[in-house]
Image: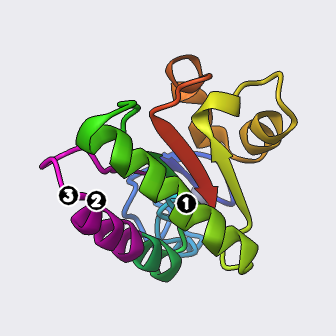
Amino acid sequence: MKDCETCGNEIAATAGICRYCGSVQRATPPRRPRVKVRTVNMESGRPTVEEGLERLQREIALARQTGVRVLRVIHGWGSSGTGGRLRTACRAYLYRELKARHLKAVVPGDDYSRASPDGRDLLSRYDDLRSGERSDTQNAGITFIEL
Ligand SMILES: [Zn+2]
């Protein structure tokens, strides 16, 4: 149901004409909210460092094409082994991209909280990040990138 734009009576959501006052209803297609924040789980499938970096590049390209503004990259926090190498390699790659000005911001989860300038800035601009704020705060297994 929706309200008639002229008289305010309740009419069928699909009605083109109000059955009470006869006024024509504008067709307003439902706007699909744009996804601004996307999560990329680099740990799934346990990729090698090389595969992981390729996936990251693909995800960044896809995000740009689809209007995503922030990628929440879960790369794990292992200090050694594949997990640790993936994290190190991801961050090295992202900082190179940042330096080349291909990315607007790189915020490592370690520094991410409402108390840090970068974290506060991201949280204030992207509502979608709030639902994960508690678990993401100071989470070394995540890196946020702004495209
Ligand atoms: Zn009406």
Residue type at mark 3 is Thr
Across and down, in percent, residue 28 comes to 53, 71
Question: Position of 41 compared to 101: left or right?
Answer: left
Q: Are marks 2 and 3 in contact (CB under 8 Å)?
A: yes
Question: Position of 5 compared to 58: left or right?
Answer: right
Residue drawn at 42 percent across, 46 percent down: 87
Establish whether ligand 1 lies closer than 8 Å to the Cβ of label 2: no
Q: Residue furthest top?
A: 134
Q: Residue furthest front?
A: 80
Establish whether ligand 1 lies closer than 8 Å to the Cβ of label 1: no
As helix, strand or loop, the secondary structure at mark 1 comes to helix
Residue 113 in view (yes/no): yes
Residue drawn at 62 percent across, 41 percent down: 108
**Among the two numbered marks 2 and 1 on one chain, the one whose residue lies closer to the N terminus:** 2
Q: Which mark is residue 48?
A: 3
Q: Residue furthest right?
A: 117
Q: Which mark is residue 49?
A: 2
Q: CA distance from mark 2 to mark 3?
A: 4 Å
Q: Is residue 56 above or below residue 64?
A: above
Q: CA distance from mark 1 to mark 3?
A: 16 Å
Across and down, in percent, residue 50 comes to 27, 68
Residue type at mark 2 is Val
Q: Within the magenta stretch, is there residue 55?
A: yes
Closer-to-camera residue (121/34):
121
- The segment highlighted magenta reads 37-59
Across and down, in percent, residue 5 comes to 65, 59
Instruction: Read off the residue under disc 1.
Output: 92
Closer-to-camera residue (23/26):
26
